[in-house]
Amino acid sequence: MTRPATRTRAPRTGLQDPAPPDRRAHGALVAFGLAALGDLAGLAAGSEAAHTLCKPLLMPLLALYVALRRGPRLLVAALLFGWGGDTLLLGDGDTVFLAGMGSFAVGHVCYLVLFRRHGRAHPRARGTALAAAYGAALVTTVALLWPDLPADMRAPVAGYSLLLTAMAYGATALGPAAAAGGALFLLSDTLIATDVADWPQAPRPDFWIMLTYLAAQALLARGVLTGAAAPERR
């Protein structure tokens, strides 16, 4: 009589334990999607209030999703440094801008460490071609922007661009999702740099910056989560 009760109770506990984190993670991802839609809709409509309300919620919700998925702590840190940059860039002035850029830079370092830990090595020829392509993009972009950037922004933008390009290239080691995320992050921040250089902008430039940025962070998170879980499946 005692043994059947013990055997019945043990499997039930094992089945129930994973369910709540899965539901919570799904809820966090849905909340992130709703906040992203709210932010993009606000930007498309020209509502600064909606952007100010939604933008600070985005990366904490994505970081919460990663934490509930038991993702790497460095991924949570990378997203939270992105949140620091997002929040700082809501302010005005060169000092605030540089602080926001610095926060993003620390996030890129976190990503680079993650790519090194969980990435897969590419064939040598393909890696060399990718490195050359990203290197050419970096040199071309900085060379074109340099004359139009404020003098005190040239060195910080160039240094940040180097780190950002290294992150985008490193993301290719985690497969297509992360590679697309790295490329979109590069595009998003290049759009910001063209604004700093006072180049002509497309209508609603903040919309395109946020659209590419949000897609970038979501794809990078997916790529890291998949890459981090891959060794456990082997």
Image (cartoon, rainbow, N blue to C red):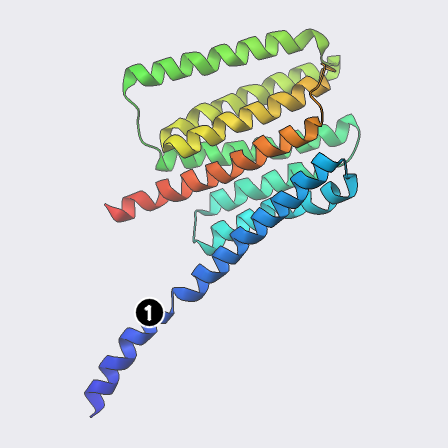
Q: Which residue is mark 1?
A: 15
SS of the residue under disc 1: helix
Q: Amino acid at mark 1?
A: Leu
> Which quadrant of the view contains residue 1?
bottom left
Which of 230/106 is in front?
Answer: 230
Which of 34/113 is in front?
Answer: 34
Q: Name the spot of residue 41 as percent of width and height, x first.
A: 68, 40
Q: Which residue does the image show at 64% across and 22% down from the upper left?
A: 191
Q: Name the spot of residue 224 as percent of width and height, x first.
A: 42, 40
Q: Residues within 10 Å of mark 1 (few under 14, many from 20)?
A: few
Q: Which residue does the image show at 75% across and 14% down from the upper left?
A: 150
Which of 118/69 is in front?
Answer: 69
Relative to 13, does residue 170 appear above or below in the rendering? Answer: above
Q: Name the spot of residue 155 as percent of width and height, x first.
A: 65, 16
- In the picture provided, is 182 more to the left or to the right than 92? left
Q: Which residue does the image show at 28% across and 44% down from the upper left?
A: 231
Which of 122/179 is in front?
Answer: 179
Relative to 165, does residue 67 appear above or below in the rendering? Answer: below
> Which quadrant of the view contains residue 79?
top right
- In the picture provided, is 173 more to the left or to the right than 134? left
Q: Residue furthest front?
A: 45
> Which quadrant of the view contains residue 143?
top right
Which quarter of the image is occupied by the C terminus?
Answer: top left
Q: Which residue does the image show at 53% across and 40% down from the upper left?
A: 78
Q: Name the spot of residue 13 as percent of width and height, x first.
A: 33, 74
Q: How many marks?
A: 1
Q: Residue furthest bottom?
A: 1
